[in-house]
Image (cartoon, rainbow, N blue to C red):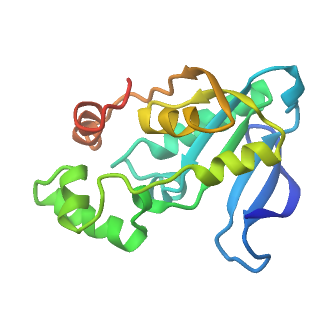
C-alpha cells in the first residue's frame, strides 16, 4: 500500500490534506488520511483517530450507532490539535455494507451486534489495523495520543512501531436507538467508556 494522491479539503472543522492510500492508483476504495493543516509530528505525540467506515452513521446520520458522532468529534479535535483522522475502508466491523444490513435485520429480531455477526459466520470484529500503522509511518508519525474507546485498537498499535502515549476517550451520549448497541460494546466487547 502506498500514497496515491492528495489534495487540500476545506471542511466545516478546518482545512485538511486528504491523502489516499491503496495498492494501485485505480483502487476505487482507498484508505484515507485526513491531516490537519497544523499537523507537525516533530512537536510531539499526534492526536490520531482510527475510524472505520460506517456509511449508515457517517454519511446518513443513523442513530443505530455512535460512529457518525465519533467522526464529527474526531474531525473537530484533529483540526484543533493538528491531528490525523485515518478513515479505514472496513465497513461494518470488516464485514461490508450488505452483511451489515443483514446483521441489522438480525438485531431487529433480538440478537445483539456480536451475536448477529457470528450468526452470519463472521468474527465479532473482523477489522485490522496494519494499514493504519503503515499510513502513520508514511506520515512520519511515531508517537500518538489515540482517540478511541476500543481496546483492540490500542492492542494493535502496541505491537507496532507506532507508540501510543495515551488514550483519549471519545464519548457520545447514548440515545434510545443505540443504547443496547453501546451496552454490548461495553459489556461484551470491552470498550472503555
Residue 41 vs residue 13: left or right? right
Residue occupying image coordinates x 43% and y 68%: 96
Residue 159 vs residue 79: left or right? left
Residue occupying image coordinates x 31% and y 31%: 190
Residue 166 vs residue 83: left or right? left
Relative to 10, residue 78 above or below: above
Q: Position of residue 17 (x, y in %)?
A: 84, 49
Depth check: 100 or 21 in front? 21
Can the viewer see residue 150 in this picture?
no
Q: Position of residue 95 (x, y in %)?
A: 39, 65
Depth check: 34 or 26 in front? 26
Residue occupying image coordinates x 50% and y 46%: 68
Task: Locate the N terminus and report the quarter of the image it occupies.
Answer: bottom right
Residue occupying image coordinates x 81% and y 48%: 138
Can the viewer see residue 37 in this picture?
yes
Relative to 70, residue 171 above or below: above
Relative to 1, residue 86 above or below: above
Number of marks in the image?
A: 0
Depth check: 153 or 26 in front? 153
Relative to 70, residue 82 above or below: above
Q: Residue furthest left?
A: 110
Tell me where residue 147 sits by quadrant. top right
Tell me where residue 183 sits by quadrant. top left
Amino acid at each position: 500500500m502506498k500514497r496515491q494522491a492528495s489534495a487540500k479539503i476545506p471542511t466545516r472543522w478546518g482545512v485538511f490534506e486528504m491523502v489516499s492510500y491503496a495498492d494501485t492508483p485505480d483502487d476505487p476504495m482507498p484508505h484515507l488520511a485526513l491531516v490537519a493543516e497544523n499537523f507537525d509530528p516533530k512537536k510531539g505525540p499526534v492526536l490520531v483517530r482510527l475510524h472505520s467506515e460506517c456509511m449508515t452513521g457517517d454519511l446518513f446520520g443513523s442513530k443505530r450507532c455512535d460512529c457518525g458522532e465519533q467522526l464529527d468529534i474526531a474531525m473537530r479535535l484533529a483540526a484543533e490539535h493538528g491531528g490525523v483522522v485515518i478513515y479505514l475502508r472496513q465497513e461494518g466491523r470488516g464485514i461490508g455494507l450488505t452483511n451489515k444490513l443483514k446483521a441489522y435485520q438480525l438485531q431487529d429480531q433480538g440478537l445483539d451486534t456480536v451475536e448477529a455477526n457470528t450468526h452470519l459466520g463472521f468474527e465479532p470484529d473482523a477489522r485490522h489495523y496494519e494499514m493504519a500503522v503503515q499510513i502513520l509511518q508514511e506520515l512520519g508519525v511515531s508517537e500518538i495520543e489515540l482517540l478511541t474507546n476500543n481496546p483492540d485498537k490500542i492492542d494493535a498499535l502496541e505491537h507496532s512501531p507506532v507508540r501510543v502515549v495515551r488514550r483519549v476517550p471519545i464519548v457520545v451520549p447514548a440515545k434510545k436507538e443505540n443504547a443496547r448497541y453501546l451496552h454490548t460494546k461495553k459489556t461484551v466487547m470491552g470498550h472503555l467508556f
